[in-house]
Amino acid sequence: MAAKKPFGGYAISFKGCNDTMESVFGSGKITPSEMTKKIWAYVKKKKIAGK
């Protein structure tokens, strides 16, 4: 049986990324939805998502 595709069909690899969590999310408290927005902004900025 073939391997199942990741949810949404995206494969994201953070290999080679040296950014800290603080540089991605900031130093203050954020909500989970804001965290998701910042992760996707980072992924798009670094062009690390493949379909």
Image (cartoon, rainbow, N blue to C red):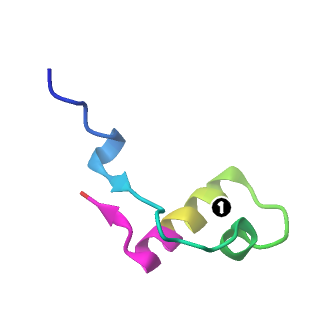
Secondary structure category for the residue under label 1? helix
Q: Which residue is mark 1?
A: 34
Above or below for 4 versus 20: above
Q: Which residues are magenta?
A: 41-50
Check if residue 45 falls in the magenta segment.
yes
Residue positioned 85% across, 68% down in the render: 28
Q: Position of residue 11 (x, y in %)?
A: 33, 52
Above or below for 34 versus 7: below
Q: Amino acid at mark 1?
A: Glu
Q: Position of residue 44 (x, y in %)?
A: 42, 73
| In this rendering, position of residue 44 left or right of residue 5 | right
Q: Label 1: few (<14), some or many (≥20) within 10 Å?
A: few
Above or below for 45 versus 37: below
Q: How many marks?
A: 1
Residue projecting furthest to the left: 1
Q: Quadrant of residue 13?
A: bottom left
Q: Position of residue 32 (x, y in %)?
A: 68, 51
